[in-house]
Amino acid sequence: MDLTDFANKQIELIEAEKNADIESTITLQSKYSPIQLQRMGVALCGLMISGQRTGLGGKFCIDFERDLGDQLPTHSFRNGDIVSVRDENSNQSGVVYKVSDQVLTVAFSEEFKDTGNRQSM
């Protein structure tokens, strides 16, 4: 196997893993409510925007947290995770940029449209 074959095989495997992750997420979202998903650690509900700035590469970085000072519930979000941030009026995808006990920062390629409503991921 030469280097090109190896690289192509890795790309194929990464694509298969990505598709399996997407399928798993769709299945979870169809079976469980947002609150149940939060209890499972794969969603966060009732977040509000606490800050925003332009980050590396011109990305729009938005800080999300619960009521000021409250710790985020136990979750599985890590740097680099692709997330969907939604409220009743919009749904936007971004990448988790930074995680702390109280704040989750998400980087968006396009300007984030804040509808003024609480957000869920």
Image (cartoon, grey):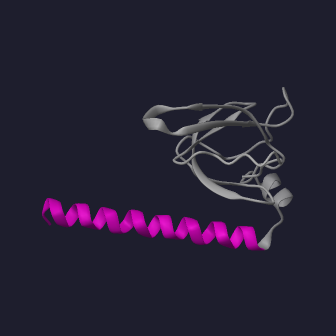
Q: Which of these two is toward me, 69 or 11? A: 69
Q: Quadrant of residue 15?
A: bottom left
For this orientation, the residue located farthest to the left is 2
x%, y% of residue 57?
43, 36
User: Number of numbered discs present?
Assistant: 0
Can you say whether 102 is above or below 96 in the image?
above
Dividing the image into 4 quarters, which one contains the N terminus? bottom left
x%, y% of residue 94?
58, 49
Residue at 81% across, 68% down? 32
**27 magenta-colored:** yes
Q: Name the side, left or right, on which 109 lies relative to 2.
A: right
Can you say whether 114 is above or below 67 in the image?
below
x%, y% of residue 102?
75, 31
Residue at 31% across, 62% down? 10
Q: Name the side, left or right, on which 5 lies relative to 98.
A: left
Q: Which of these two is toward me, 4 or 97? A: 97
Q: Quadrant of residue 49?
A: top right
**99 magenta-colored:** no
For this orientation, the residue located farthest to the top is 69
x%, y% of residue 54?
54, 32
Magenta stretch: give its range: 1-30
Residue at 72% across, 52% down? 121
Q: Which of these two is toward me, 20 or 80? A: 80
Main SS category, magenta section: helix
Q: Name the side, left or right, on which 72 lies relative to 12.
A: right
